[in-house]
Image (cartoon, rainbow, N blue to C red):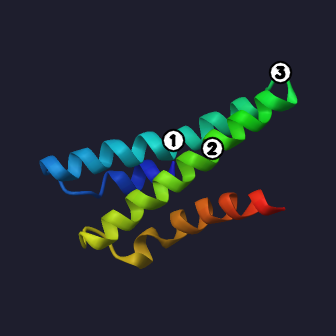
Amino acid sequence: MQIIRLSTTLPNTPEGKVIRNQITKSGTSIGANYREANRARSKPDFKNKIAICESEASETQYWLEVIVETEWLSWDQVKPEYDEWDCLLSSRDL
């Protein structure tokens, strides 16, 4: 839900709309795929869905970095979401 709220603060320009769409898709996909992973039919199915979550988390971080680079939002404004996805990505090594 946080990523949806963050996306609504982006500018209403053609570029802002593209980034809003991308970050909303990748950010919400993480939760949906994680939920599906918890209902996986097999261990390989679970691993596949978790891999999708990781990929989407990495993409979401990328879009957050773009948002900061364009100066649409500050690092402080995107840091909580960035850190949340970073936690998911770092848990892969556990």
Residue at screen point 86% across, 25% down: 42
The numbered dot on residue 28 is 1
Say which of 40 and 81 sits in front: 40
Few, some or many residues within 10 Å of mark 3 (<14, 14–19, 20+): few
- Distance, label 2 to label 1, CA atoms, is 10 Å
The numbered dot on residue 41 is 3
Few, some or many residues within 10 Å of mark 2 (<14, 14–19, 20+): many
Residue 41 at least partly seen:
yes
List the residue tagged with mark 2: 53
Helix, strand or loop at mark 2:
helix
- Distance, label 2 to label 3, CA atoms, is 17 Å
Residue 38 at least partly seen:
no
Position in image of residue 59 (x %, y %): 47, 52
Q: Earlier in the sequence, mark 2 or mark 3?
A: 3
Question: Residue flagged by tag 1: what amino acid is it?
Answer: Thr
Helix, strand or loop at mark 1:
helix
Q: Is 78 on the left-hand or right-hand side of 36?
A: left
